Image (cartoon, rainbow, N blue to C red):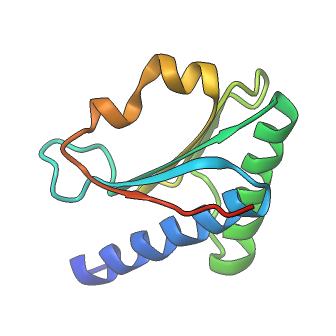
Amino acid sequence: MNKLKKEASSELLSKVIVEGMMDNKAKDIVVLDLREVENAVTDFFVIGTGDSSTQIEGIASSVTRLTRKELKERPWHQEGKGTSEWVLLDYVSVVAHVFSQELRDFYEIEEMWADAKRTEIDTDY
């Protein structure tokens, strides 16, 4: 796949992930564009917060369902589904993180990747 197609596909995937998070009312959704960051592990991080382990599971499931339905994409790797305080969905070019507020505050991923372009999503629920 050429670079332009890959970038367009990772952008579209990140948008569908945001939509999946919004479907289950994730809070504080942030997209970090890592494409210009040296040594970045992926093109985008999409980060959202849930209020409970049940909501965190629901957000992750919503993202997985929507990416499969809209783009025929499935996560290459998933972590955290058992504890539901931080679920990671790795689509290789985009990594989705669904956190509890406590763990999001503790890990401060946005601060670790502070040189990435940051887009805050307006969630007007």
Task: Residue at 75% x, 49% y: name it.
Answer: 59
Position above or below: 29 against 107: below
Position above or below: 92 against 123: above
Task: Residue at 48% x, 76% y: name it.
Answer: 12
Task: Residue at 67% x, 64% y: name it.
Answer: 124
Q: Quadrant of the C terminus?
A: bottom right
Task: Residue at 41% x, 26% y: name it.
Answer: 108
- Image quadrant where residue 113 sits: top left
Position above or below: 109 against 22: above
- Image quadrant where residue 63 sits: bottom right
Q: Position of residue 40 (x, y in %)?
A: 23, 44
Q: Quadrant of the N terminus?
A: bottom left
Q: Position of residue 70 (x, y in %)?
A: 68, 79
Question: In the shown orientation, is residue 66 left or right of residue 71?
Answer: right
- Image quadrant where residue 67 sits: bottom right
Question: In the shown orientation, is residue 47 left or right of residue 83?
Answer: left
Position above or below: 92 against 3: above
Q: Nearer the viewer, residue 27 or 85?
A: 27
Question: In the shown orientation, is residue 107 left or right of residue 42?
Answer: right
Q: Residue furthest left?
A: 38
Q: Nearer the viewer, residue 113 or 42?
A: 113
Q: Residue furthest right?
A: 54
